[in-house]
């Protein structure tokens, strides 16, 4: 518990220093996070070295495409350009299959392809948000919400938790902790709402509930994924937390709902 708290505090401090002191560097920081996440994804394969090479090459292509798209500042480019690497992954895997052609190849393909989709689709929205002029306001809300919600859900769950949220995936999570964590996060963020992006200011409760729930689902999704592939922790880079995939599962899922909700409200 102490190790987890110390490593978490160090991570929060580093991220806040970058975000508040050098906001333009946050894209570079998040790119580094994505690289680690892709490398952790190698745990979800066991046999095919050829597929691992294809996976890493496709991940590199995705990252280079993101770098090109960031200079265009368009959500469309952030979607279209990187998708080329997805087709490269699929085509190269098909040709490789002709040479290896066994059950274990399909097992590795499922693990690496699903990991590639997960990291690429879930981590890219934050890379896009970091390139926006109002990135500081947006990312402070996103990360602040997830950090506060996770912390309060843990303590409220320990104190009042009786009904398990998802026993087979995360035995320690409770409905009481989940709900009280969301409510607590709202009351903690409410005094700061004028510091956030305009839509969050106007609809703070809506954003907290929907983005917060998405974060909790993202946490459970990561647990579901690891359990089905027999992986306990995605890595060990963050003592007490595991790997990057373990630590950022909530905020990456929440960022997708944030973008969708923001686009919906802007269209009204």
Image (spheres, rainbow, N blue to C red):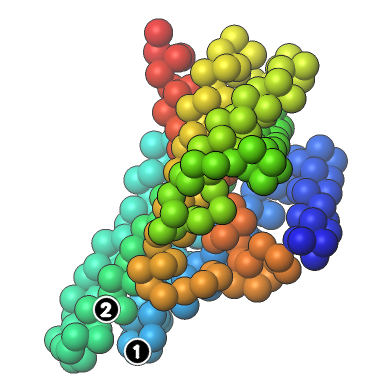
Could you tell me which residue is drawn at 83 percent across and 49 percent down?
13
Residue 65: % across, % down: 46, 55
From the viewer's side, name the closer residue of 131 and 223: 223
Q: Which residue is mark 2?
A: 107
Could you tell me which residue is drawn at 57 percent across and 60 percent down?
246
Q: CA distance from mark 2 to mark 1?
A: 9 Å
- Farthest residue toward the front? 162
Residue 225: % across, % down: 40, 62
Q: Tally the marks.
A: 2
Relative to 225, say whether 178 is above or below. above
Could you tell me which residue is drawn at 76 percent across and 41 percent down?
19
- Would you say 118 lies left or right of 30 here? left
Relative to 20, say whether 183 is above or below. above
Instruction: Give the structural element (helix, strand or loop) at label 1.
Output: loop
Instruction: Give the structural element (helix, strand or loop) at label 2.
Output: helix
From the viewer's side, name the closer residue of 192 and 100: 192
Q: Quadrant of residue 16?
A: top right
Residue 191: % across, % down: 77, 16
- Would you say 113 lies left or right of 118 here? left
Could you tell me which residue is drawn at 43 percent across and 50 percent down?
166
Q: Residues within 10 Å of mark 2 (few under 14, many from 20)?
A: some
Cβ atoms at labels 2 and 1 below 8 Å apart: yes
Quadrant (top left, top right, bottom left, bottom right) of the N terminus: bottom right
In the rendered structure, find residue 47 and report the number of the disc placed on it: 1
Quadrant (top left, top right, bottom left, bottom right) of the C terminus: top left
Q: Residues within 10 Å of mark 1 (few under 14, many from 20)?
A: few
In the rendered structure, find residue 22 and report the number of the disc placed on it: none
Precedes in sequence: disc 2 or disc 1: 1
Q: Quadrant of residue 58?
A: bottom left
């Amino acid at each position: 518990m102490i190790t987890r708290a110390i490593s978490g505090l160090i991570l929060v401090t580093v991220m806040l220093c970058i975000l508040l002191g050098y906001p333009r560097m946050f894209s570079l920081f998040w790119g580094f996070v994505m690289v680690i996440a892709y490398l952790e994804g190698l745990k979800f394969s066991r046999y095919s070295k050829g597929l691992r090479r294809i996976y890493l090459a496709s991940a590199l292509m995705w990252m280079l495409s993101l770098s090109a798209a960031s200079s265009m500042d368009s959500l469309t480019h952030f979607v279209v350009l990187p998708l080329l690497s997805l087709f490269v992954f699929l085509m190269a895997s098909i040709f490789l299959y002709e040479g290896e052609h066994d059950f274990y190849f399909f097992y590795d393909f499922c693990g690496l392809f699903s990991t590639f989709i997960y990291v690429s689709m879930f981590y890219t929205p934050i890379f896009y948000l970091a390139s926006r002029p109002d990135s500081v306001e947006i990312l402070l809300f996103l990360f602040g919400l997830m950090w506060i919600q996770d912390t309060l859900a843990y303590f409220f769950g320990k104190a009042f938790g009786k009904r398990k949220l998802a026993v087979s995936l995360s035995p320690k999570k409770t409905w009481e902790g989940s709900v009280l964590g969301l409510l607590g996060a709202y009351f903690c963020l409410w005094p700061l709402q004028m510091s956030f992006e305009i839509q969050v200011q106007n609809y703070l409760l809506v954003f907290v509930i929907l983005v917060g729930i998405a974060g909790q689902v993202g946490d459970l999704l990561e647990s579901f994924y690891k359990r089905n592939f027999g992986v306990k922790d995605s890595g060990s880079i963050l003592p007490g937390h595991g790997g990057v995939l373990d630590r950022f599962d909530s905020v990456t899922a929440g960022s997708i709902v944030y973008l969708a909700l923001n686009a919906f409200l802007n269209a009204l």
